[in-house]
Image (cartoon, rainbow, N blue to C red):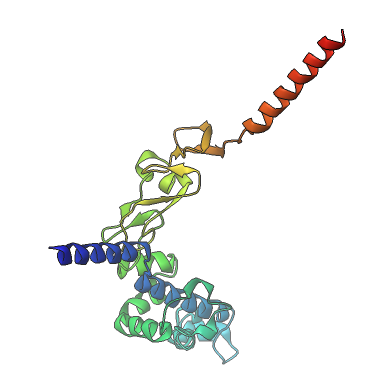
């Protein structure tokens, strides 16, 4: 019986750790694909066909903006770390270039659809959220992109005083992890060592209570009392 309890405790800890640490690799990899694709679009934004006669080229070859020639040039830098000025947003994902290339290969037709017909849309939302369903919009979490706590009340997620577990991903529990000084399921209450400075329907501001040094105060009272006794004796 004791072994079963120990095993249950271990599983509970592992489950808790898993809940706390969401890598959200598929969504972040998709956004890596988007960022590198977008960099390619920026680099080729002012380019045109190499012939020199832009008017003739656009009439006979089509616009360079949505040409196959430009798409090939853009794809040369997609899923490559070297295409981005920094990788801060994508740290912690091992083999990200390989994983990105796999997504690209599996969704080649979807990428082409964006390039030829959907460039007016936000690629991250259109591709990663709506088409591939690997991410959720900001303020949503889980397989069906449920709203984070607070949004149904017309406020920000966790009333802007915490983070929603799984925010932006297809993972997570949606539970709020409150900032220091805030508590409750929605992070709209103050901790015991904080007081409520202000509150509206959509927000609350908590401030740390000032600690009063009672021991020092008692000493001062005692000294004043001694001084008064001394004066009365002199009289």
Image coords of residue 105 (percent x, y) = 33, 85
Q: Is residue 232 left or right of residue 95?
A: right
Relative vertical location of residue 163 with respect to residue 23 in this rendering, above or below: above
Farthest-out residue, top: 235
| 202, 223: nearer the viewer | 223
Work out which quarter of the rendered image holds the N terminus and state it.
bottom left
12 or 41, nearer to the observer: 12
Against 9, residue 33 (above or below) is: below
Residue found 45% across the figure and 88% down from its top: 72
Q: Say if 210 sits above or below 25 in the image.
A: above
Depth check, front residue: 132 or 17: 17
Residue furthest to the bottom in view is 51
Q: Nearer the viewer, residue 184 or 142?
A: 184
For residue 128, which quarter of the picture? bottom left
Q: Position of residue 183 (x, y in %)?
A: 42, 43
Please give left or right for residue 179 compared with residue 154 in the image. Answer: right
Q: Quadrant of the C terminus?
A: top right
Q: Quadrant of residue 103?
A: bottom left
x, y percent for residue 161: 48, 46
Number of dots carrying numbers:
0
In the rendered structure, the answer to whether residue 119 lies left or right of residue 225 reads left
Q: Please give left or right for residue 206 compared with residue 226 in the image.
A: left
For residue 132, which quarter of the picture?
A: bottom left
Q: Please identify the residue farthest to the front as the structure is shown.
A: 233
Q: Residue at x 78, y 14 (%)?
A: 229
Q: Residue furthest right?
A: 234
């Amino acid at each position: 019986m004791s072994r079963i309890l120990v095993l249950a405790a271990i599983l509970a800890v592992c489950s808790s750790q898993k809940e706390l640490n969401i890598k959200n690799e598929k969504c972040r990899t998709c956004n890596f694909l988007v960022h590198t694709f977008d960099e390619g679009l920026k680099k080729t934004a002012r380019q045109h066909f190499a012939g020199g006669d832009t008017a003739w080229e656009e009439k006979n070859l089509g616009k360079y903006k949505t040409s196959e020639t430009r798409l090939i040039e853009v794809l040369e830098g997609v899923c490559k770390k070297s295409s981005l000025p920094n990788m801060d947003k994508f740290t912690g994902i091992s083999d990200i270039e390989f994983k990105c290339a796999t997504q690209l290969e599996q969704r080649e037709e979807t990428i082409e659809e964006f390039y030829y017909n959907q460039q007016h849309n936000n690629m991250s939302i259109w591709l990663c959220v709506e088409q591939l369903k690997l991410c959720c919009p900001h303020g949503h979490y889980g397989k069906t992109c449920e709203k984070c706590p607070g949004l149904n009340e017309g406020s920000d997620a966790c009333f802007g005083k915490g983070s929603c577990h799984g925010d932006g991903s297809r993972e997570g529990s949606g539970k709020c992890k409150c900032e220091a000084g805030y508590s409750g399921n929605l992070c709209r209450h103050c901790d015991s060592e904080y007081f409520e400075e202000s509150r509206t329907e959509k927000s609350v501001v908590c401030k740390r209570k000032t600690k009063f040094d009672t021991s020092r105060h008692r000493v001062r009272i005692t000294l004043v009392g001694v001084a008064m006794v001394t004066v009365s004796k002199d009289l």
